[in-house]
Amino acid sequence: MSETKHGPGSKRAQRQADIAEYVLQQGSATAVDLAERFAVSTMTIHRDLDELERQRIVRKHRGGVSVQPSSIFESNVAYRMRSAVREKRALARRARELVEPGMAIMIDGSTTTLELARLLDDDIPLTVVTNFMGAISVLRDLPNIRLIALGGEWYRPHESFLGVPCLEAIDALRVDLLFASISAVSGGFTYHQEQEVVLVKQAMMRAARRSVLMVDHTKLDRVALHRVAPLPAWDLVLTDDAAPERTLQELRDQGIPYEVVPSEPG
């Protein structure tokens, strides 16, 4: 018999998500502590940790578990979907106000812009270009959306299409607005931890008349491995009201248009 929405499989998935969030916050944990915290047996905890390790979110070691390096776990969509949700939704509401009927817009493979895709459900005609399966799933049945799905090599951790075929598809297009996010902002540059994603984001910026960066405060004053673009390459930066003042001052010093968007109440 298949598991129902609220059956054992749903409870197990939620527990594993809660375990991942706890370990990511603490940095490490023992199996015994996790079993006590989540009121299950150590055998169950080890099965949960095996699954989280398979997803490359945590790393098991004798007696416990620790987080994977940020370059790994931050690429996992399941993790990113649970991070800064209120802030992402607030940024998406403001970004939605920039979209006008008849526009061609591009949405990158980020969970921040996925929140924008979820707001494109009314009657205005749009062309939407994306490489992100999450956005494709949200938009594919909307009658007023002309959806262009960018093909390429399927990257499971990102749930996105990347690689040379994707780059070639982007280069053949021109859109009014790009909505994108990144992993880190520091020292006047934007960064991401994986080069395949960097190349796609850079191609998307070249294909757009204007590029809007949607970045919540958890990504500010951080550095990832690869540079995406200098901050002045973005036409507008949207961030939330927990952004540090030093970052906002940096934007002002460089003359970069930005908006601070109030977050949703908790």
Image: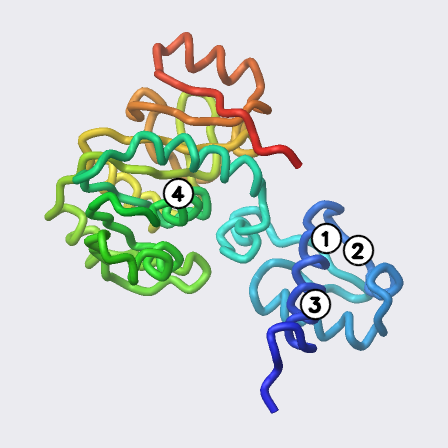
Q: Which residue is under mark 3?
A: 49
Q: Earlier in the sequence, mark 4 or mark 3?
A: 3
In three-dimensional space, the C-alpha distance between marks 1 and 3, rounded to whole angstroms, equals 10 Å
For the residue marked with disc 2, what is the amino acid? Answer: Ala
Residue 23 circle label: 1
Q: Residue furthest top?
A: 253
Which label belongs to residue 29? Answer: 2
Kindly report which numbered mark, 1 or 4, lies closer to the viewer in this rendering.
4
Depicted 246 relative to depicted 97: above or below: above
Furthest residue to the left?
172
Locate the C terminus by quadrant: top right
- Amino acid under label 4? Leu
135 or 213: nearer the viewer: 135
- Whichever of callouts 1 and 2 sits on the residue coming sooner in the sequence is 1
Element assignment for label 1:
helix
Q: CA distance from mark 4 to mark 3?
A: 32 Å
Q: Residue at x 67, y 57 (%)?
A: 20
Residue 249: where, in percent of width, then height?
A: 49, 10
Residue 150 spot, x, y in % from top left:
23, 56
Residue type for callout 1? Val
The image quadrant of residue 158 is bottom left
